Amino acid sequence: MKYLFFLLLFSLTLDANEAQNIIKKLEKNLRGDYMYGTMKMIVTSKRGQRTVKIESWSKGNDKSFIKILYPKKDKGITFLKLDTQMWQYIPKIERTIKIPSSMMLQSWMGSDFTNDDMVKESSFEEDYHTKLLSKRGNFATLELIPKEDAAVVWGKIIIDVDIKNAAPLKETFYDDRMKKVRILTFSKIEKHGSHTIPMIMELKPLDANKKKNSTKVIYEKIDFDTHIDASYFTKHALKRYSR
Amino acid sequence: MRFTLALKNILKSKGRSLTTLLLSLFTTTLFIVYVAFMDGSHHQIIKSSVEIYTGYAHVNLKGYRDESDYGNLIEDASSIDEILRNDTSIKTYAPRFETYALLSGDEKSVGSMIVGIIPSKEEKLSKLASSLSKGEYLNDNDTNAIYIGIKLAERLKITIGSQIAMVGSSIDYSIAADIFTVKGIFKTGLFDFDAQSAFVNKSYLDSVILSDNKATYFTVDFQNNDHINKVTSALQAKLPSQYEAVGWDSLLSSLVQAMLVDSIFGYISISIFFLVIFFVVMIFSYVNIYTRTREIGLLRALGLTSKDIFIILFIEILLLATVAVSIGAIIGGVIAHHYELQPIVIDGIAEMYKDYGLVSDEVPMHFDLFTITWNALTIFILNLLAIVYPALKINKLTATEAMRYV
């Protein structure tokens, strides 16, 4: 009996370690020291479909600079994220505005992503307890429950992972009442330098009023092997690189 | 005979009768005044919320109440305008376009509700114009002018003539941005409203967020707003099926429920007081009846049954309660009516209850005949119930026991 108990405990510990290793590799793969990319964001809602083209520069997980390239009406709008703070520059009114915390849950550029999604720094590895739910060949399903002191908004996240490529396939987000609220799916995994990245991700809110909504982000260019000048991550950059 | 005996007993024991009468009269008056004051303050809070901005009814797309986003707009505002214009039950109406945007002064940025209004129409529908605190109210030709809540102005650290940037979303979800000059500052007294709202001329806002001929809803003031469910149902029948007419009680449902909960707590508080009064009346009756034990024993010896005795005691309290409750109801009613017309002024009460939406230190009572009637009946029934136990108890004694009772 005692033997069985230890065997069970040992296997649970192994599962937890394995789950932790999968998450660690996944996050390391998705994050480079620097990343430059251009992407297309297709937002579908009750009011129709809209395409936004974006150019982005980032350093680690806490600094990023985004510039809107298209549509023409929004061209030159820039966003700067430093840690958990966010600023935007609007060329039409020549103003740099800090986005206050009260606006963090507002939609970003009319998409299903919120401002908070853009600035959050939560790390699956650091902020969540990980549990391996299933594993079949190169595919695993993990359950992530937030740690007690983690500043995250989700009650639970279930992630399907491609272990071989250390890439996510699907993330299902639950609120604090354990109600499923949105699904993020990933596809078209490609190798870029030492990283294997899903080039397409699609966010689908599950709210009954947002049945027609979805936001698809398609990476057109992505480069992890580049050095980005520190000048991009200053408030002066908002106006300077807007043009 | 029983009635005559009861009447004689009342008149014979003047002190006892007067005490019972005054106790019931005071309780009735107090109950009616308390309820009139409580209902009055609730009516005042709801009336303020309705008349300051919300309005008596809204017409909006079905689903807008659940998800107030650009997916649930009135896409052809002119067609709704035409229906409302031809409805004779409507006194006045106006379209509004409510959106949420970032307002930014020189130092601070604040997320706020921005509303496109037709200033001349809104003047007749809400208290926005009359709530002007500084500067000027908007007019229908204004362009980059903004009319802003006093608390919001304080949060943004701006005043009349200051320029503020607005960054929001156009209805095609592109970024909408513009610079506005503060034309006026208003103070309604509704704390959250003054801290989170700003108004601009709708025709100009339409050009900024591309919302021409669109509205989030129409606000409606009927010729007679007393039976709001009836008039909104009649309006609903005239609207295309995808739209709905919603009365103020649904628009302010959370406030109405808060008032209901407050009323329940109010009634619980006053019930405790009544429980005390009930036992005082009962103990008083008990003592009174027992002081008359020998007299009751004599009546029993003369041939009256215990039922007769019970009826005599019951008629006594019935007569006293009828007189006391009637006078109490008249006094309570007169007080309620007087303070409905000339409200009580309690300095600082608006500040204390600002979160509830109380905007004035004047608290009118609410005079309502139905409420007064059920208040009075409650006290009347309590009085009758108070006599039951002592009367039954005394009737258990035999005539001999009663006559020997010291």
Image: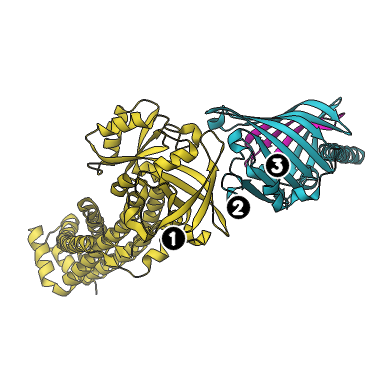
Chain colours: A cyan, B yellow
Most foreground residue, B322 or B139: B139
Q: Which residue is mark 1?
A: B160
Q: On the picture, is B170 further left or further right than B349?
A: right
Badge 2 and badge 1 both on one subunit: no
The residues colored magenta run A156-183
Q: CA distance from mark 1 to mark 3?
A: 35 Å
The picture quadrant where one finds residue B353 is: bottom left
Q: CA distance from mark 2 to mark 1?
A: 23 Å
Q: For residue B48, say whether it is visible.
A: yes
The picture quadrant where one finds residue B89 is: top left
Q: On the picture, is A34 further left or further right than A82?
A: right
Q: Residue B329: percent from the left, percent from the top? A: 19, 60
Q: Is residue A170 magenta?
A: yes
Badge 3 and badge 2 both on one subunit: yes
Amino acid on which the number 1 mark rests in the picture: Ile
Q: Residue furthest right?
A: A3
What type of secondary structure mainly makes up the magenta span? strand
Q: CA distance from mark 3 to mark 2?
A: 18 Å
